Amino acid sequence: MMKYDVITFGSATYDIFMSSRKFETVEDEKFITKKGLCVSLGSKMHVEDVFSSMGGCGTNSACSFSEQGLKTAYFGAVGKDIFGEAIKKELKRHGVSLNLLKESAKHPTAFSVVLSLPGAERSILEKYGACHQVTEKDIPFDPSTKLRADWFYVSSLSAGSHQILVPLLEFAAKEGIKVSANPAGSLKSEENTKILKTVLDKIDILILNQEECSLLTGIDFNEEKKIFKKLDEMVKGIAVMTKGPAGAVVSDGKKLYSAGIPESGLVDRTGAGDAFGAAFTAGYMETGDIVHAIQLGTANATAVLQEMGAANGLLKKGDWGPWSKVEVVTKSI
Ligand SMILES: Nc1ncnc2c1ncn2[C@@H]1O[C@H](COP(=O)(O)OP(=O)(O)OP(=O)(O)O)[C@@H](O)[C@H]1O
Ligand SMILES: [Mg+2]
């Protein structure tokens, strides 16, 4: 029977990027960010650049693990459509097993359209799909089946799929499967945040960005020390806070490990969080060394930032790219 090094969970989407300098930004209180990205109503506008690629945190992270030389499967769903075919092809190209992938006859593949104004910002239009509809019933929990792994990487579970979080982590705890989680989707609602809190004692590595750490702990994100104190109480294992271009901080309950980023260019920032989280976990799985894990996560995120698309540019095992490894500073708590 097949046992994987890691099985990833989360979304499988297809992303279409459209970029144009002709998009206008309009300031208006009715937009959440107080700014809108606009085109004129009733007109046709040519966009300069279009690019498409696989996205989705579950599939992105699976590709990172596989490229790091780990035997990897993605659990989730795509539809029976061209986007689903494209995702399967991309997973295969990165060596990810399709044995746990469901092809839904009922729901189309999830997709996103990313509209960007070069040099400014981007807006994302997101359509939920097959991966957001998976439920507990879709998971082959019977231990004689295919769900065997040393680690689960549980990424963002949005919409209906959030329902699998608790059964998944209970199964992992029962079977002695280690868990790394990047549950950003849970923090989008208070109800799901509450649910996440009930399983933090089953998580070996919790990875969240600053804003998500603040939402989970209820502490302002500038109060880093306080946040980690709370996270250390709440989480069984280590806690990782990513800070975008300001790098990352990790706590193992005894020490804080901090790192910045190497000097590099930036082409497209989609997928940086997934690339960091998966490679951090892969580095930790292999060595148990937090310094090494931060360096590998940072290097993989930097590599992905240099190419369009969330799973393009990923580092292969042993390759660190042209950037120097980031310095990691440790401090006792
Ligand atoms: N603009 C950037 N420049 C350099 N490195 C970056 C940048 N953005 C992210 N990174 C790297 O990627 C890591 C994770 O990024 P970030 O904290 O933005 O995660 P996130 O908010 O979860 O991202 P995502 O939107 O992809 O989910 C950072 O710790 C850093 O190493
Ligand atoms: Mg993220």
Image (spheres, helix red, strand yellow):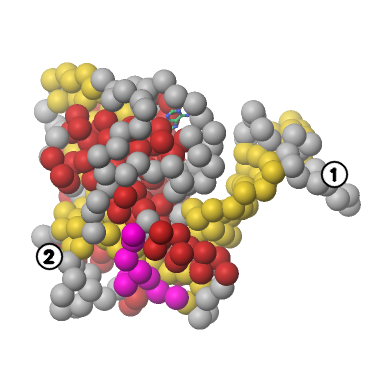
Residue 313 appears in the figure = yes
Residue that lies at the very extreme toward the right in this rendered image:
42
Element type at marker 1? loop
Say which amino acid is labelled 2: Glu
Say which amino acid is labelled 1: Ser
Q: Up-down: is 109 above or below 219?
A: below
Give the side of residue 37 with respect to residue 282, left or right: right
Residue at the spot 26% in from the left edge and 76% down from the top edge: 140
Give the side of residue 23 with respect to residue 89, left or right: right
Q: Real-space Cα distance between discs 1 and 2? A: 56 Å
Mark 1 residue crowding within 10 angstroms, few (<14) / some (14–19) / many (20+): few
- The one of 44 and 86 positioned closer to us in this rendering: 86
Give the side of residue 27 with respect to residue 199, left or right: right
Residue 240 screen position, x and y as percent: 27, 36
Q: Up-down: is 234 above or below 219?
A: below
Segment colored magenta: 95-103
Is 102 within the magenta? yes
Residue identified by numbered label 1: 40
Is 14 within the magenta? no
Residue identified by numbered label 2: 175
Magenta stretch: dominant SS?
Answer: loop
